[in-house]
Amino acid sequence: MAPKKVSKPSKAPKKADPLFPSRPRNFGIGGNIRPTKDVSRFVRWPKYIRIQRQRAVLYQRLKVPPSINQFTKTLSKNEAMTVFSLLNKYRPETAAAKKQRVKDAAAAAASGGKAPERAANQVKFGLKHVTTLVEEKKAQLVLIACDVDPIELVMWLPALCRKMKVPFMIVKDKARLGALVHQKTCAVCAITAVDKADESQLDLLKNLAMEKYNNNAELVRKWGGGVMGLKTQAKLDKRAKAAAIEEAKKKASLGL
């Protein structure tokens, strides 16, 4: 005999609360205000934002050669803080300070007094100037911005630094380097000498640069990119599974 079905006790209808009556919302025209919705997908972004996002996606999708991919390997936040705290002591003089110094020097020369001296050790900047310092092996430490556009401006500089055995680092970003030398942006900075008190710290940074960049063979060999989107990854996984099933069927039919 079939087992008897046990009927579940029916729930009593919920009584309406007279103090708080149910008022269903109407989101039609002239009704309630609609809940907020993330519409960023439907926004027509400015052209420069679209370009930079497309560039970021392309850098993920396409295979990026090592000479370009190395610019994604920047210093960590703490290491960069140490570097910039040292270089902040040797910032070059501003245009106003230079004007005042020249003025004081002229006044001192006219009165026969001693002219104010320029600071001996300063951060050097400018692509041509830094290149010359690297070629002459005068640069002690070179900082290269990671976001120089076009990248071809500085793409060859790491190879030159390696050849001349000049320590270099790749840092974020050109605006921060520009603030260091009183400019809007700066692609490359270099330090040629420091005071005696800071020599030990500079040696530590040079050793760090040699370890992380100059002598790091992984940077020279490793390609970047090649990461497909989620849809493409799912499609490739599906294709691989189908191929594996087909291969298994062939083996089964051959009795392997």
Image (cartoon, rainbow, N blue to C red):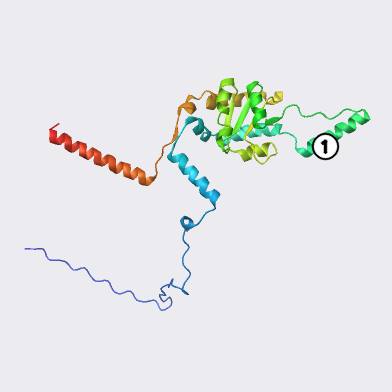
Judged from this view, the residue extending furthest toward the bottom is 18
* Quarter that holds the N terminus: bottom left
Q: Position of residue 245 (x, y in %)?
A: 21, 40
Query: Element at badge 1?
Result: helix
In the rendered structure, the answer to whether residue 99 lies left or right of residue 223 reads right
Residue at image position (56%, 23%) is 162
- Given residues 28 and 56, the one toward you in this image is 56
Q: Nearer the viewer, residue 83 or 159?
A: 159
Residue 201 seen in render: no
Q: Is residue 152 left or right of residue 200?
A: left
The location of residue 200, given as percent across then percent down, is: 65, 23
Left/right of residue 9 with respect to residue 140 in the rendered view: left
List the residue tagged with mark 1. 100
Which residue in the rendered view is the most extreme toward the right? Answer: 111
Residue at horizontal 56 percent and vertical 21 percent from the top = 163
Q: Is residue 220 visible?
A: yes
- Dividing the picture into quadrants, the one containing residue 101 is top right
